[in-house]
Amino acid sequence: MGYTGLHSAEMIYIHKDKKILVSIVDGAGKEGSSLIALMKQSIDSNIDIKNQNGYLKSTSINGIRAVKEEIRSKNGIDNKLTMIISGRFLLTIVGTNVEMNDLEEIIKDENMISKIQKLAQ
């Protein structure tokens, strides 16, 4: 889907009470590069915030900077991973009732980073 020069794709996987949303935004072009620049600033900063409901933390996955976010509530858990790949693609994976380690494994097992890097070539 394109909107003012931004293009994105989303996939949703649902199994029982678990849901995984994978979103990729292509930050090529004038509008997209502005969005990616703002997100890159956030991702490149060193974040480590914890409270009783979860955390927000900087990390690296396969050498790519990322931000992990966990929100726990009485209804379950939401985990989110955000990263910028090849300075152009914003990859976001959100898991409802899915542990953070499982989201990281999906990225690695599906070779998402290398597949998205090939799109930038």
Image: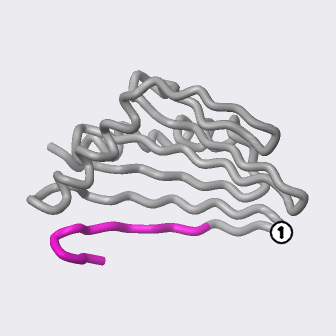
Image quadrant containing the C terminus: top left
Which residues lie in the magenta part? 1-12
Q: Is residue 67 above or below residue 89?
A: above
Image coordinates of residue 59 in percent, x first then y, are 52, 25
Q: Look at the image and say whether residue 115 sits in the magenta stretch.
A: no
Q: Secondary structure at mark 1?
A: loop
**Residue at the image position 70 percent from the left and 64 percent from the top:** 19
Image coordinates of residue 40 in percent, x first then y, are 31, 39
Using the image as rendered, state which of residue 86 and residue 30 is in the foreground: 30
**Residue at the image position 28 percent from the left and 46 percent from the top:** 38
Residue 38 shown left or right of residue 13 in the figure: left
Image coordinates of residue 3 in percent, x first then y, are 24, 77
Return the residue found at the far left: 30
Residue of label 1: 16
Q: Is residue 55 above or below residue 96?
A: above
**Residue at the image position 69 percent from the left and 39 percent from the top:** 100
